[in-house]
Image (cartoon, grey):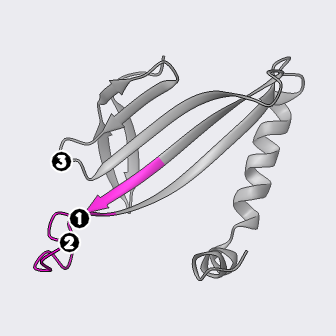
Amino acid sequence: MLSDPQSITYNGSSKSLPRTAVTPKGSVYTSSDGSYRVEIERTIVGAGDTYGVNVKLTRRSDNPDAEQAFEGDRNVENSVELGFVVDMTRFEASTVIPLLRTALLAYVDSTLQGRLLAGEV
């Protein structure tokens, strides 16, 4: 199990996220004010010869339109998720996974990110 608390840096500011939940599949870490949440979940993929680990960071903000009669209690949440899928043998995983991660993060540059957020697939 990962250490408790976890720490993230968001927009140059460090945030401490203590563990707030443990499930059979993973853990949830949440900042004291509830604005930041990290969810880590492990799953079996396919026929059971591979597993996945997903890490999702969510930022929650109060509803900017709280005066709206039907949406006063709705919060705004935006998330980014990173998933790893690994063969159970872990063959070459220690070298291949970091290279794949680096390549994917470089691929999703600001231009592609903007296009994806605009709805292109």
Magenta stretch bounds: 57-76
Q: Position of residue 106 (x, y in %)?
A: 73, 63
Q: At numbered mark 2, what does the secondary structure look like: helix, strand or loop?
A: loop
Give the quadrant of residue 50. top right
Front disc: 3 or 2: 2
Q: At numbered mark 3, what does the secondary structure look like: helix, strand or loop?
A: loop
Identified at 58% across, 76% down, the residue is 117
Could you tell me the amino acid type at mark 3?
Asp
Mark 3 surroundings: few (<14), some (14-19) or many (≥20) residues within 10 A: few
Q: Is residue 118 left or right of residue 67?
A: right
In the displayed structure, 21 sits above or below 82; it is above
Mark 2 surroundings: few (<14), some (14-19) or many (≥20) residues within 10 A: few
Identified at 41% across, 21% down, the residue is 3
Q: Is residue 79 left or right of residue 14?
A: right
Work out how far the residue at label 3 is from the one at label 1, CA to CA, in angstroms: 16 Å
Q: Position of residue 114 (x, y in %)?
A: 60, 80
Q: Is residue 112 left or right of residue 79?
A: right
Find out whether the residues at labels 2 and 1 contact each other: C-beta distance under 8 Å. Answer: yes
Give the quadrant of residue 109. bottom right
Q: At numbered mark 1, what does the secondary structure look like: helix, strand or loop?
A: loop
Q: Residue 71's mark?
A: 2
